[in-house]
Amino acid sequence: MAATVTEQTVLRMKTLFERATLDEVAGRLAQLRAESERLWGKMSAAQMLAHCSATMEMAVGMTLPPRRFVGRLVGPIAKKAILTDGKPFRRNSPSDKSLIIHDDRDFETERERLCALLDRFQAGGPEGCTRHPHSFLDP
């Protein structure tokens, strides 16, 4: 009888600080079209780009969202699951109200805006990130 060996695979989360990851995301954004059908959520492609840009504006410190009470209670648990366990946000997870885009947006303008913010984020490295607490994940 052969012995079985259990292998543990350690997955490393991709990061936008790495040029290869940023290039992968840029390639996906280049393939996106205004009429692309959403796979989940309620936003159009242009609204989704604006949503992602608003998130990146928080990451680089252009906007400073207020702290949420519920985040102070359960945020650290969610943060551990996302950052330590490598679990992605679940589909249709609640977003900060400031990140929900209701109005129509110009697709090309929003794509250019997001690409510029991603480049800024990558160029700034970890030192360029905001030190402002996350509205939900930080206690």
Image (spheres, rainbow, N blue to C red):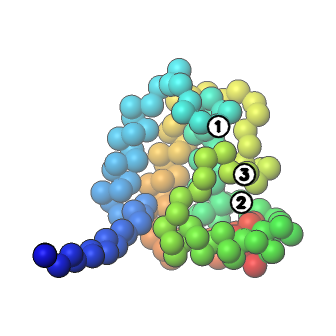
Image quarter of residue 110 = top right
Q: Residue furthest top?
A: 35
SS at badge 2: loop
Image quarter of residue 89 = bottom right
In the displayed structure image, the side of residue 113 where residue 62 appears, left or right: right
In the displayed structure image, the side of residue 34 where residue 21 appears, left or right: left
Residue 4 position in % (x across, y down): 21, 75
Q: Distance between the residues labelled 1 and 2?
A: 24 Å
In the displayed structure image, the side of residue 111 where residue 14 appears, left or right: left
Q: Please tell me the numbered disc located at residue 79.
A: none
Q: What kind of residue is marked 3?
A: Ser
Q: Earlier in the sequence, mark 1 or mark 2?
A: 1
Identify residue for label 1: 41
Q: Which of marks 2 and 3 is nearer the N terminus?
A: 2
Identify residue for label 3: 95
Q: What kind of residue is marked 1?
A: Gly
Q: Which residue is drawn at 81% across and 74% down?
A: 73
> Are the residues flagged by discs 2 and 3 in contact, CB closer than 8 Å?
no
Please state, as top left, top right, bottom left or bottom right, where the N terminus lies in the image.
bottom left
Q: Residue at x 52, y 29 (%)?
A: 108
Q: Distance between the residues labelled 2 and 3?
A: 15 Å
Identify residue for label 2: 63
Q: Residue at x 52, y 52 (%)?
A: 117
Above-or-below relation of 137 to 27 = below
Q: How many numbered markers are drawn?
A: 3
Q: Residue at x 80, y 74 (%)?
A: 72
